Amino acid sequence: MSALKSVSKSRPQVLILEPDLAVLDYLRLTLGDRYALSLFSEEKSLLDRLEQSDEPDIVLLAVHSGREPLPLLTHIRCARPNLPVVVLSCYAEPRDLEMVIRLGVRAVVMKPFVGTDVEEAIEEHLTSADRKSSAADSPREIPLNETHSFVRSSKRMRDLESQASLVARADIPILILGESGTGKEILALYTHKMSARSQNTFLKVNCAAVPADLLESELFGYEQGAFTGAVKTKPGKFEICTGGTIFLDEIGEMPAILQAKLLQVLQDGTFSRLGSRSPMRVDVRVIAATNINMKEAMANKTFREDLYYRLNGFTLNIPPLRERQEEIPVLAEYFIRKGARRYDRDPLPLSPRLIESLSNHSWPGNLRELENVINRYLVLGDEKAILEELAPASSQITAGTSAEPANGAGLKALVKNLKGGAEAAAIAQVLEGTGWNRKAAANDLQISYKALLYKIKQYDLSPQDRA
């Protein structure tokens, strides 16, 4: 049945899906004078309508016994994360009603309809949507644990937050795509916190950081005697994480042999430890992330196509920081507060000039680079050094013309030494805060342990350097 559209644009746009044509006709007669209706008897027609650019005000969705509402609801909520949905139902199974409520449905109106039940549900949620619209535009900081929060203020990130919270409830595998440093781990942790598994374990495994020959035992464990040095049985991350969420970062770097084993876990929830022939069953939600082009990796046969489609229950794309520069002042303030707690310092003010310089920077390293710059500012307390670091190369050359040596390499070395001094001070401060625990410091700095050892050697740092 095709959509019946009202010519009026002043009335709220209400979409109704109801396979029962008699009920659909009743709703048309009852609601047609107050709302601009689009009526559908088929799911595909409704989904096609939702792909159009204009945003309806509310959807009424009929749910019938014996028909699984989860796929359709998930499609609607992901296509239009902020669109109010009211379910019309003729049965009241607690399990099914709980499921649709967890998927973000605003209300359930039971059939047969009594009086003005449907009109009241529409009016209540149109009013509530108006009240929430201004609040939705304000910056939001959602604490996730003692050290991390999900911070957003742009529309793109608000939509991403809504999508993540919705697919979190569906308990399907998720693939997070984005450049390095955009906050893929933070989004994975937020998704876990919004899911029914939030009280259980969240474990991260960096597939690029663990050597290929150790990654299998890290993920799936091993039996005593499975290889030289396996003196006792060790459970793997999947076993430890049962009931919770495992986050596989840099999944594109996973060796092919392990891709096949991961595919089996996603298909039937079973795997075997190294050295064992007995399968184990686990209940783990998998969230994977990568910064590589997955389609290119599949074309080059470095990543299994069947595994990609298993992981891609739903894809969340994080935009780079340069595409949401309006968030930079909010994120900078957050990183100032976070760094002040970590280093036990008073927060420093962010001047209009510094905010402008931060906002104009291209941030190839995204949020990770911004946090590192803010930490250097917090440790050094020197706004001028940060401004010079962020200044475009042309500005630095103009400012330093009178002192520039005949050989341009001298200026490059000067700038490099300036950045190096700030970096050395920041690294020394973190090492101080961890009591020179290098592994803990590397984790705080979000760099590899080997990279930290190299930096310590490069800047000739030692415990005697501590202030």
Image: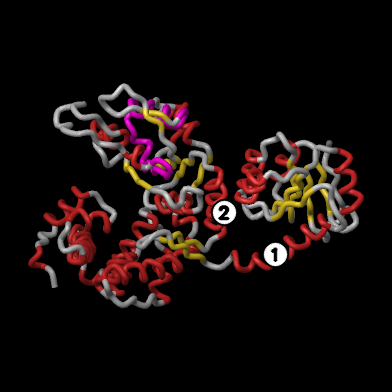
Kind of element beneath mark 2 = helix
Against 458, residue 207 (above or below) is above
Residue at position x 20%, y 70% from top?
403
Q: Nearer the viewer, residue 234 or 459?
A: 234
Q: Residue 259 at what x, y percent from top left?
A: 37, 29
Q: Is residue 414 visible?
A: no
Q: Which residues are magenta?
A: 242-268
In the rendered image, residue 245 lying in the magenta stretch gets the answer yes
Is the residue marked by circle 1 packed among few (<14), some (14-19), or many (20+) residues within 10 Å? few
Against 234, residue 358 (above or below) is below
Q: Is residue 234 visible?
A: yes
Count of marks overlaid on the render: 2
- Disc 2 + disc 1, Cβ < 8 Å: no
Which residue was labeled with disc 1?
128
Q: Is residue 86 left or right of residue 263?
A: right
Which label belongs to residue 162? Answer: 2
